[in-house]
Amino acid sequence: MSNSNFTRRGLLKTSAMAGGALAAPTLFDGSVWADAHSGYLNAPTGSTVTLGFNVPQSGPYADEGADELRAYELAVEHLNGGGDGGMMSTFSSKALQGNGILGKKVEFVTGDTQTKSDAARASAKSMIEKDGAIMITGGSSSGVAVAVQGLCQEAGVIFMAGLTHSNDTTGKDKKANGFRHFFNGYMSAAALAPVLQARYGSDRTAYHLTADYTWGWTQQESIQAATEAMGWKTANNVLTPLATTDFSSYVAPVLNSGADVLVLNHYGGNMVNSLTSAVQFGLREKQVNGKNFEIVVPLYSRLMAKGAGENVKGIFGSTNWHWSLTDEGSKAFVKSFGEKYGFPPSQAAHTCYVQTMLYADAAERAGTFNPCGIVEALEGFKFDGLGNGATEYRADDHQCFKDVLVVKGKDNPTSEFDLLEIVEITPRAQVEYAVDHPMFAGGELGKCNPGA
């Protein structure tokens, strides 16, 4: 059921066909929205439409932010008819024509979140109020995503979340104007736990180091619950400030804790630094409880693997997407990105490119930039061809559901980009959960806000 203020009219809903194939994309009678619901914030009046790309250009997640910005610029190029079109040709929806969005040329403004919630909100607010941005996207921190999503809900614009992995983003902090294509902590744990059990057994004791903000908390809760369900014990969970660069004082106590697994609930530069510290303390050469000591990184990325170098070899984790996937959408995106920038894209780049395309496609199908039209077009939308196989934007919480990748650091990489190998593609059914699951409890999706 829709959560918008408006009634569905003049549309055909997407439905799954036999054998898991997708029906034709949702179609809307654009005149309904354009004529009856024209009052909304930052409605474009000229020949252009402005999108706001709000990414960490400084701080511990700056590497991800740089790749996100590259992907956003590529998406704009493709939307405006430049380049080879990338995943527009493989996307199951055929609404995008390379003539902008609804015939308007796409322009963009950028901001630096600094990986700080206050800075991210200020940047997004400026984009909306001064630049007339009609959609905000980006972020590589769940704290940032939650803050900016809340701002966009209040302002009346759509927020297409970038890299945000906290359960809370589409859990207790979900908002009708916000949508997330990236997976979450629960999904990582559900995909990883069976692999960890198969490789390391059920008799293990884990010590957690956890980034002290919403992502770290929910990632740790998820992986602890999943590993304890298969028999593991938890020795300790120690919170580490996001601004930490030297993790030696946090790693040292692990040596005498009785744990034989260290779980690093860290991302970006934090993970690079904490893993480096753990290796320097000799943890990977230790034996504890008669077992080889192991390290697990629940949320992985190629950029993190590159930063950590040799230290990632053999270490398991999960990821939302990887450039080595061989589906047509992934190959098209890797080709476009590689030809433009000279190297393959990260999962951060993939997520942000896809979110931009999904927003543009929703506007085309709805026939309007009205946020409530976008909400209608995305809720329950089933699609394929964007690199993760068959995917659905669940209407109840605006979370995408798709397959999840379990990866490990390659023992014998062939290049500086060939650092992770996919060990399992976990089917969507294994990582799904009920809308009222306790880890996602609290908060209300609410109703869309058109801002005017």
Image: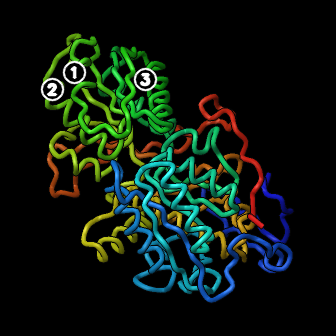
Residue 336: in sight, yes or no? yes
- Give the residue at x 31% y 56%: 63
The picture quadrant where one finds residue 39 is: bottom right
Residue 14 disc label: none
- Give the image location of residue 83, x and y in percent: 40, 83
Image depth: mark 1 or mark 3 in front: 1
Q: Is residue 280 left or right of residue 322?
A: left
Q: Which amino acid does label 3 sit on?
A: Thr
Furthest toward the bottom, the residue is 47
User: Mark 2 — residue?
Assistant: 281
Q: Is residue 154 left or right of residue 210?
A: right
Q: How far apart are marks 2 and 1 (CA)?
A: 7 Å
Q: In this view, does 90 lie to the left or right of 235?
A: right
Q: What residue type is labelled 2?
A: Phe
Residue 252 disc label: 1
Q: Do the residues labelled 3 and 2 touch (CB within 8 Å)?
A: no
- Give the image location of residue 78, x and y in percent: 46, 79
Q: Do the residues labelled 2 and 1 touch (CB within 8 Å)?
A: yes
Q: Is residue 66 left or right of residue 368?
A: left
